[in-house]
């Protein structure tokens, strides 16, 4: 795809269910808005009517890992074209609850699906032609809430009816966490690892400090 100049700021939040990312993404949105920035708050899979329909299928219907991965990337393509790229072209801050790292963590790590195939799909869906050549659309920063799966399970116990991912055994989430760790090793400059086992206030202080250090928040 060819895009208009992207002057906005693309941030993704990642972590296993129960790690606390959804709690703090709203606080970060409020912090940016307080400084006069326009913010688009969105999520994956989802963010558009089509992608939300695909989300329902992926989270609830049985399917093989390749079908699951294809639906994830189909939803992502629509999300990029309809929401993320237009917002970045307008100069907005885009805060996305999960992006491609989640696919590598859940489908690659958790499901054990071939990460080389995921990389091919990532290139197909996220490649953009810019003045300096073809680039992959990726977040400027990915905030990873790292939490032991055992602790995450305690937080989620009885909170809601689990979807097909949330109902997986602990070993599945250990593999998901390993998938996130591999993504961090591959692109350490893009990630900010946050200790999700701290108190909510301490986690927010760490998150806020990352954005202050980047010069994105006062």
Image: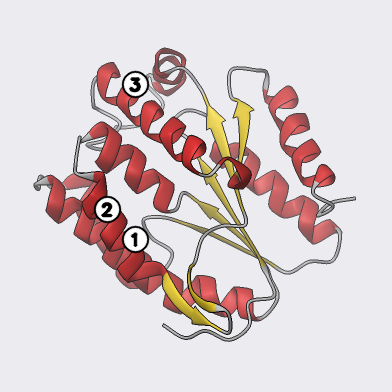
Looking at the image, can residue 177 be seen? yes
Q: Using the image, determine if residue 139 lies above or below residue 160.
A: below
**Residue density around tag 2, few if under 14, some if 14–19, many if 20 or more, within 10 Å:** many
Q: Residue at x 41, y 72 (%)?
A: 127
Q: Quadrant of the N terminus?
A: bottom left
The residue mark sitting in front, 3 or 1, is 1
| Residue at the spot of label 2 | 118
Determine contact: label 1, label 2, CB under 8 Å.
yes
The disc label shown at residue 48, or none = none
Q: Which mark is residue 174?
A: 3
Q: Quadrant of residue 204?
A: top right
Can residue 52 be seen in this snapshot? no
User: Residue 122 shows which numbered tag?
Assistant: 1
Q: Position of residue 201 (x, y in %)?
A: 74, 25
Relative depth, front residue between 217 and 112: 112
| Callout in the foreground (2, 3) | 2
95 and 210: which one is in front? 210
The CA span between labels 1 and 2 is 6 Å
- Residue 42 lies, in percent from the top left, at 52, 59
SS for dot 1:
helix
């Amino acid at each position: 795809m060819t895009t208009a100049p992207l002057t906005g700021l693309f941030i993704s939040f990642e972590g296993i269910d129960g790690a606390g990312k959804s709690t703090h993404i709203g606080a970060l949105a409020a912090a940016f808005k307080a400084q006069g920035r326009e913010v688009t708050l969105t999520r994956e899979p989802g963010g558009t009517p089509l992608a939300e329909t695909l989300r329902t299928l992926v989270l609830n219907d049985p399917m093989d890992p390749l079908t699951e991965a294809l639906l994830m990337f189909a939803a992502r393509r629509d999300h990029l074209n309809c929401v993320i790229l237009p917002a970045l072209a307008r100069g907005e801050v885009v805060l996305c609850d999960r992006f491609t790292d989640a696919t590598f963590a859940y489908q690659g790590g958790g499901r054990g699906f071939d990460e080389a195939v995921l990389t091919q799909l990532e290139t197909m869906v996220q490649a953009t032609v810019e003045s300096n050549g073809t680039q992959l659309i990726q977040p400027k920063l990915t905030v990873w809430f790292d939490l032991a799966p055992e602790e995450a399970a305690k937080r989620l116990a009885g909170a809601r009816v689990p979807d097909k991912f949330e109902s997986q055994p602990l070993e599945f989430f250990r593999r998901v966490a390993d998938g996130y760790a591999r993504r961090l090793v591959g692109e350490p400059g893009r990630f900010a690892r946050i200790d999700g086992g701290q108190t909510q206030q301490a986690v927010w202080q760490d998150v806020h400090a990352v954005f202050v250090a980047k010069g994105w928040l006062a």
